Image (cartoon, helix red, strand yellow):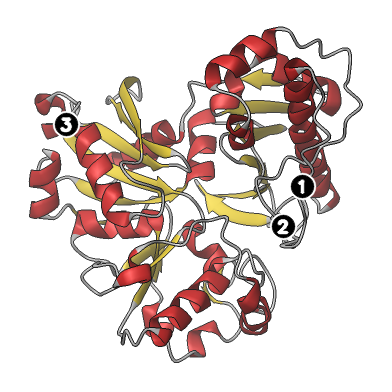
Amino acid sequence: MNKALALGVDLGSSGLRIALIGPDGEQLIEESSPYPSSLEEPLGWVEGLTSLCGLLPAAALKRVRALAVDGTSGTLLLCRADGQPGPGCLGQALPYHFACREQATAAAAMAGSGPAASANGSLARALHLLAQAQAIGAGGPWLLRHQADWLTGWLLGDWSWGEEGNNLRLGWDLQRQCWSGSIACQPWATALPAIRPSGAVLGRIAGKAAQKLGLAPGCQVVAGSTDANAGVLAAQPGKGDGVTVLGTTLVLKQFSPRPIEGPGISCHRVAGSWLVGGASNAGAGILRRFFSDSQIEELSRQIDPRQPTGLQLRPLPARGERFPVDDPELEPLLGPRPISDVRYLQALLEGLTALEKQGWQRLQAAGAPALERVITLGGGARNPQWRRLRQQSLGIPVLNRPGYTAALGMARLAATALQKP
């Protein structure tokens, strides 16, 4: 077992990534790719994982003894007991940013409060999916599974389970260890997963999945987490540290000695500690609407963070926000656009920086510990000018650590199963 390897799988908002670590926790290999079709296509998650595993040495794959999967929190799928997606429009998952305004009142009535009691929660998406199934005459029984839980089910050949962090927005109450409000009493409650904590060993990989991926039959499948939580596990923050993920969306995370609740605020339990935070619908993804990656890199070099643009943009990709405010009707503010591309890029970065600052202020006001330093992950962590803008705004040290990926965090979580008797 001293030569056992652990594999982490990250289903992010824009693509897949896998990381392989050795027995000492050192990262050996990391590979990534965009989704073969789209975030919403579940069979593409399998196809993408298969392709990435095909890039790893066959001998290394045979040494993998544990793996774990993270996914975008809130991307939800309706499927059969054997994992098969539904017909027609039901064959696609509803993505994390899809707000179901028509189900907001019903979701709030069922959940009472918390992240599920919102148009932006998974519970509203679940009600939307169930209503779609009824409308097209697609009878049950159905299962409701989030992205990471569905792929974990494919690995096991058993879709019974759901990891607790991935299901908070569906209504799982971490503190009480039950479904919130009246959710468990609904006639469709049999569609809910059996919840297991992050890091729990769920079983051994199914023979069909092992053969397809090139893994050994005895490989253990470990309950993973959300993509943002996985990034935190990779960063391993200390006391007073906050973690900002500058990916397609902007995510803030911070360990807390006690749970914190509030609209738009997430509260997870990871590695035995409470992890609080929030995720905006805005993020680095908006930049690609106006600029290519090479343009962003070139224009960023010309930004002088000491000279603010004075523009106050709200760089949401579409109507609706989750955090720092939970408002499904909030509109983007992307103009007026200045003639200078440099100034416009800077204004967008300033707008995202303002959202980050508001997010940290929101967490502090809700009772989170004082923030002394921010560790930055994700693609945006490669931008030094953005780091300077953020450090000026936050007034504390900001470190860029783009090499700390969610896939690495999942590999580290999977490796904990190798130490268990």
Q: Which residue is mark 3?
A: 54
Residue wearing tag 2: 260
- Helix, strand, or loop for circle 3? loop
Q: Nearer the viewer, residue 40 or 162?
A: 40
Say which amino acid is labelled 3: Gly
* Other-residue count near label 3 (Cα within 10 Å), few / some / many at <14 / 14–19 / ≥20: some
**Disc 2, disc 1: CB below 8 Å?**
yes
Q: Position of residue 152 (x, y in %)?
A: 29, 55
Residue 368 bears which disc, if any? 1
Q: Quadrant of the N terminus?
A: top left
Residue 337 visible in the displayed image: yes
- The image quarter in which residue 59 lies: top left
Report the residue at 63% width, 83% height from top.
106
Classify 358 as above or below 123: above
Q: Secondary structure at mark 1?
A: loop
Name the side, left or right, on which 6 lies relative to 145.
left
Q: Residue furthest front?
A: 339
Q: In this rendering, would 300 be left or right of 134?
A: right
Compare marks 2 and 3 and give the one earlier in the sequence.
3
Alpha-carbon distance for marks 3 and 1? 43 Å
Mark 2 vs mark 3: in front: 3
Q: Quadrant of residue 68?
A: top left
Structural crowding at the residue carrying mark 1, measured as other residues with C-alpha within 10 Å and reported as few (<14), some (14–19) or many (≥20): many
Q: Is residue 28 left or right of residue 271?
A: left
The alpha-carbon separation of the residues under discs 2 and 1 comes to 7 Å
x, y percent for residue 253: 64, 42
Question: Residue 16 placed where, x, y %?
Answer: 36, 38
Residue occupying image coordinates x 64% and y 55%: 266
Q: Amino acid at mark 2?
A: Ile
Asked if 325 appears above or below 375 in the picture, the reply is below
Q: Earlier in the sequence, mark 3 or mark 1?
A: 3
